[in-house]
Image (cartoon, rainbow, N blue to C red):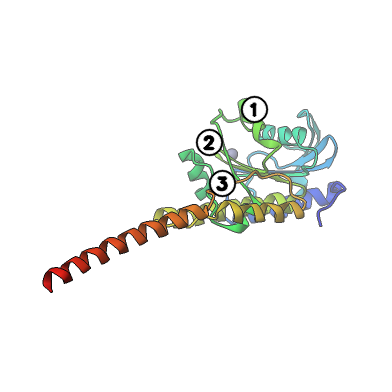
Amino acid sequence: MYQKKYYSDFEAKKLICDIGKRVYNKNFVAANDGNISVRVGPDTIWTTPTGVSKGFMTPDMMVKMNLDGKILAGNRKPSSEVKMHLRVYKESEETNAVVHAHPPVATSYAIAGISLEKPVSPEAVVLLGRVPVAPYATPSTEEVPDSITPFIKDHHAVLLANHGALTWGRDLIEAYYRMESLEHYALMLTYSTNILNKANELNCNQISDLIELRNRMGIKTGGVPPCEIQPKQEASSKQAVIEEIVAKVTKRVMEQLQKGG
Ligand SMILES: [Zn+2]
């Protein structure tokens, strides 16, 4: 299902332009925000140039670099945010693509410092798992890659505090879909918890079934959202309270009847 081999240079550059259009048209970025990269060898990537809208890129604008940040081909400069991408490739061998954007709803969670982890949607559990918030780091410094490093191996999506989101995957479609799912999930969470003010969460048994499904899909990363064990005990204790109330009411009614009689 997912490609094992690396993209060719031609494929990588074209695919980055295609996905850039989607990122821009979906309102995941404004102006020249965001960046995309694709791995074409163990130590080489193609990435988007700085100062260009992701919706209007052509393959000749792309920059080829090695994982140490050395430019190998292209006439433009890469984004300073490419440091995050390089760190993900270095830490995760299976990663072949990284997407960074500022999707407005998910970024609002990043601004609030709230992880996306409430288990309300089976798709979000399977496709994203838990999305933690990496601590705030000054843009373009080494602090940025350092802030995400603890999450790279176990996750494939992270919110960047007061900044945006980063997703990665075994190919560019997977990395991009994770960004799409992340924004969709953030939007559903906002509606359910802040507008309807009601969210029935999936319990631990339901989540463990979903994690098993995810394992069968060959996805080992994502983490497990926190959940509550749905104990039989709780149900039976509720039943006990109801029975107690019924008994009390019955007793009172009988007493009234006897008095009346
Ligand atoms: Zn950014």
Q: Which residue is mark 3?
A: 31
Instruction: Check disc 3 and give the amino acid type.
Output: Ala
Task: State the residue in front, 83 or 93.
Answer: 93
Q: Is residue 27 visible?
A: no
Q: Distance of mark 3 from mark 1, alpha carbons?
A: 26 Å
N-terminal of the pair, mark 3 or mark 1, is: 3
Establish if 243 lies above or below 11: below
Amino acid tagged 1? Asp
Residue positioned most to the top: 142
Task: Give percent across and percent down for residue 184.
Answer: 56, 56
Residue 67 is marked as none
Looking at the image, which residue is at 36% across and 61% down?
243
Q: Nearer the viewer, residue 215 or 89?
A: 215
Residue where numbered disc 1 is placed: 146
Among numbered discs 2 and 3, the one appearing first in the sequence:
3
Quarter of the rendering occupied by the N terminus: bottom right
- For image coordinates 41% across by 57% down, the residue present is 238
- Of residues 54 and 170, which is closer to you in this image? 170
Q: Residues within 10 Å of mark 1 (few under 14, many from 20)?
A: some
Kind of element beneath mark 3: loop
Callout 1 secondary element: helix
Query: Which numbered disc, 2 or 3, marks the residue closer to the eye?
Result: 2
Label placed on residue 161: 2
* Alpha carbon distance from label 1 to label 2: 13 Å
Q: Is residue 174 visible?
A: yes
Q: Position of residue 217 (x, y in %)?
A: 76, 55
